[in-house]
Image: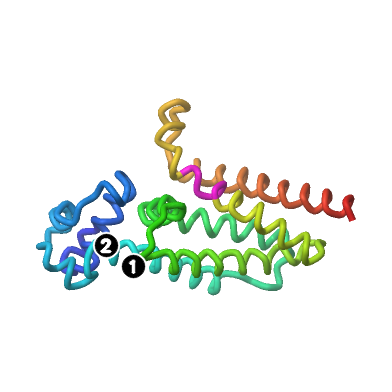
Amino acid sequence: MNSDMKSEPRVRILQAAAELFARRGYGLVGVREIASLAEVNVAMISYYFEGKIGILHTIIDTFFDLYFKLVEKEYDPEMTPEESIRHLVALSIGFMRQHEDEALVMFNQLPIDEPEIQDLKVQRIRQLFVAMDGLISRFSMNPTARKRTIAILGPAIINTLYSHLLLHPLSAGFFKIEKDDLFYEEYIKLITEFVLGGIRSVQNYILQEE
């Protein structure tokens, strides 16, 4: 937890909850545990968030808000499609590195049936897919093929970008690789080529089918 945030109870609660949810999962973490790590009383959690589900809602909503603001600020529509992919992959991985706990919470929670935040998840993922569709549309695909491509490749690309967060503790133990600057530099390069190669292969496949 950042020491410069110690005076702000709301921020401490969010940081503590993100850390606990990321390590143990939302369902296994209790409100008292969050309050203890955040150094607040349980009543403060009710005051700021109306309970644990309110914290989760805020973590996911804030994660997407920050991500889309970053993309809006950094994205250059004058880039070629391939340059755009390279830029957005690097941007996305760098963002997840900076917000690792929140990214783990968000991605791990997406497939879980949680009625209180289902609308939020649908809204935010729709936003992500609309943005992805705008990017894929710059490759040579007809609208029907593009829709099918987004439906299939969209989740695969998202999983590819964040899989290192989920599986690195296992791969690090086997390969003895640390998540340092060198790792992320190589990770961005390889994942970018992987994503671009997949899009090119699908593009060629669709053109052959038409």
Rendering coords of residue 102 (x, y %): 37, 57
Q: Residues within 10 Å of mark 2 (few under 14, many from 20)?
A: many
Query: What secondary structure is found at the residue carrying circle 1?
Result: helix
Range covered by the magenta-colored residues: 159-164
1 or 2: tag closer to the N-terminus: 2
Mark 1 residue crowding within 10 angstroms, few (<14) / some (14–19) / many (20+): few
Q: Which of 169 and 144 is in front in this view?
A: 144
Taking the spot 12% from the left edge, 62% from the top edge, the residue there is 42
Q: Is residue 7 above or below residue 168?
A: below
Queried whether the magenta region covers residue 162, the answer comes back as yes
Disc 2, SS: helix
Q: Where is residue 6 in the image (x, y as percent from the top left)?
A: 17, 63
Q: Is residue 119 left or right of residue 53?
A: right
Taking depth in this image into account, of 58 and 147 the one nearest to the observer is 147
Q: In this view, does 32 lie above or below 84?
A: above
Horizontally, residue 13 falls left or right of residue 181, namely left
Amino acid beneath label 1: Thr
Q: Measuring 70% from the left and 67% from the top, which residue is drawn there? A: 79
Residue 198 picture location, percent across and down: 71, 47
Q: Is residue 50 above or below residue 100?
A: below
In this figure, which residue is indicated by the disc labeled 2? 14
Q: Is residue 162 left or right of residue 173?
A: right
Viewer-side residue, 6 vs 60:
60
Q: Mark 1 points at which residue?
A: 58
- The image's mark for residue 182 is none
